[in-house]
Amino acid sequence: MTSYLLKRMGLMVITFIITVFLFFMFIKLMPNSQPSLNDPILEERLRAKEGWNEPIPIQFGMWVRNIFTEGSFGFSLNKRQDVGSYYFSKMPASIQINIIPYLLSIPIAIGLGILAALHKNKWIDNIISVGIMVFISIPYFVVIVVIQFIFYFELGWLPDYVVATATDFQNNYWWALSTYIMPVAVLTLVAVPGLARSVRAELTEQLTQDYMLLARSKGLTKRQATYRHALKNALVPFLPGIFIGIIGVINGGLITEKLFRVDGTGRIYLDAFQAIPPDYAMLMLITTFGQFVALLSGIVGDLSYTLFDPRVRFGSGKIS
Amino acid sequence: MMNIDKSKLVLVHGKDDVITDVPLETKEIGYYKDSWNRFKKNKASLVAFIIICFIMLFVIIGPELKVYDLPTRDSNLARRLRYLEPKIPVLENFGIFDGTREMKAGKQFWHHMANSDFGEGIIISGFPQELIDDVNHPDYANQTEFVVLVDSYAFTNYIESYMPVTYYSAGTGETDPLNPVLQTLNGEEELQDFLDKNYIIDIHRVIELTDSQGNPTYQYKVRVDRFKMALNQSPEDTYFWLGTNKDGLDLFTELWKGARISIIMALSVVVINAVIGLTLGSLVGYYGGVLDLLFDRLVEIIGSIPFLSVLVLLTLRFNNEMWVVLVAFTAQGWIGSYGTGRMQFYRFKNREYVLAARTLGASDARIMFKHILPNTLGLIVTSYALAIPAFVFSEASYSFLGIINYREALSVGMLIEQGRAAMHTYPYLLIWPSLYIAILMIAFNLFGNGLRDAFNPSLRGVE
């Protein structure tokens, strides 16, 4: 099993390196990737450090070397500082708004999915299914904007339609905290349907399996059989996803941060994209980091699968 | 053994009798007929299908329903017709879509409007009669501003043609407070032209200038009826069904234009993905071997590239052309249908009917297209029915963020973003595009699910 895992991880790392290099090359091939600076000293320094006159593979090598020797991912001309320190300084804000909805949405989604599956085709299932259908279909930014409009501009129930800034927290802590209620509630709402639908589907399928019939015939009640057997089997496929999601939380979301005016990593992405000339060093960092997170997720997913699902553990030889 | 005299044997049927078989009276139900029957039973999907047909109809004819070329002819003039509320004939009599809006302005301004000829009938309610008669009425001495329900069309015409809202609050600066509404006409000819067309309300000022030869010329500062100039009709006869946006574009036309472009893009993306993915998938699935191993790696690398980065880099490199968006969405999009195709061909290539076909001498191509493909078609069609809303979803998201930004039209995501920016004052700009995309997405998903259940009854109600 270890060799299987190692093999998979090795492939993942190779894929990671290839994609990052492809991006680096593509960015270097952009016509305006080497900006002309007003500051000759800075330009000279960057030229020497990042090897602007060298061929692209060597530049890539220097870029990697700089990461390991100096911890520097490049210099942002827009922000006038190192991209790495700027990007990672904005990360707490993204985590702050994403972590609670994420933690809330999982139990709610699983609960709703189980409820719907147990009462399949009854009214309670119909209500949940219609709700899931509606919220899965409508793009979530539409849901968020409409909720902002109704509850802030029409009804006036909310303290604000965007989240409070750091200075607001210093001035009036409780008011600032109260601005987080709506975003957290809405983000939970839009995160629930996808998982709930999968849980319902999976549990529905498990409930019709033969082992359930056996469990009932040996004398377990439906409740016992469901909780002891069906539920365990139904939830296994989601556990890796749940772990991967925690890693994903730090990556923030472009739309969420734009809508709630969060000063986080998502906004940096849009800033880097919209700047003239675009902030390529920043884009490179964000892409690399995103890829790195995806790599981690993949590894964590694989590990947790082997931990939670014995079928993968013992049958590993055949899958690769 | 019995002995029977042969002469006693008689034929039951005469030699000339024709034996006719009674045909089966049950109707033959094939795979597609059966699927259609199942689909019909699913009422929600059927309704969704009808809604989709309606939307498609409007996507085709919607942009042409209203002839409104002002923004392309004169965008500055169009901008004067910005933020007009929705107004629809007939419905306006029932208190909805009547083009009214609440506006806040100083009482001097309202007083002047109520008493001028040009401002007749603009104020619907909210401004007291006493103030119309006497602007300094003692009962309202403390209140300087009023929120008044107005006809937004006539009101816009008034503030764009006759008197700006800032007229009384502009202070006593050097500039003429009427400047925002004045039109400059150079020379007699332009004046005569405008007089002939009956645009002019009054001539505010005449400036005498000398041209390069030293002859005197005249410049006229006039107030013109903007609605007449722009559309050659009065505000009462003007209908923008869903209102106008910040640039004076007709929201109804723009919405369907945006819808058209996103549907066209969705269909192209799905078709391209299907062709590339299915071709590769079927070849790889059917032949397998080294090809399979090679493509496995390739697909893993391509699939792991984040889509957003591809889109961003491509748009930065080649600008926001339609083909760039197309390339970005198909660069990785084919992987999905590649997977479907490969799986299906892999699964079916060892079935008995394929063996039978091969025994009869069918070529590989014939087996693939005549035997395996029709068997997988149901599943494939279903996955594409769900791919269209998925594309519309992500296209709307990225255009909402401003990453996709067509030159040809405002996409629906852009319209929602504009509506979001103006939602506190002009909610209709947010509501209509949101409603459109909500209905479209729900309808497509219901339809897709119905289609899946119809083609693959074993999956019914799984999700």
Image (cartoon, coloured by chain):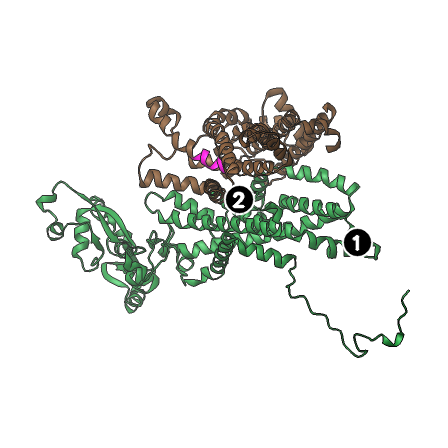
- x then y, percent, for residue B407: 50, 51
**Residue B447 vertical placement versus A106 (above, below):** below
- Which chain does the numbered disc 1 sit on? B
Give the amino acid at mark 2.
Ser
* B111 relative position to A207: left or right: left
Task: Say if the magenta span includes residue B383.
Answer: no
* A161 relative position to A85: left or right: left
Find disc 1 in the rendering and name its residue.
B364
A249 or B367, nearer to the observer: B367
Give the magenta range: A186-193
Identify by letter the chain in brown.
A
* Residue at 71 percent of width and 30 percent of height: A11
Q: Indicate the quadrant containing the C terminus of chain B: top left, top right, bottom left or bottom right.
A: top right
Task: Say if the magenta span includes residue A188.
Answer: yes
Find disc 2 in the rendering and name its residue.
B394
Give the main secondary structure of the magenta stretch.
helix
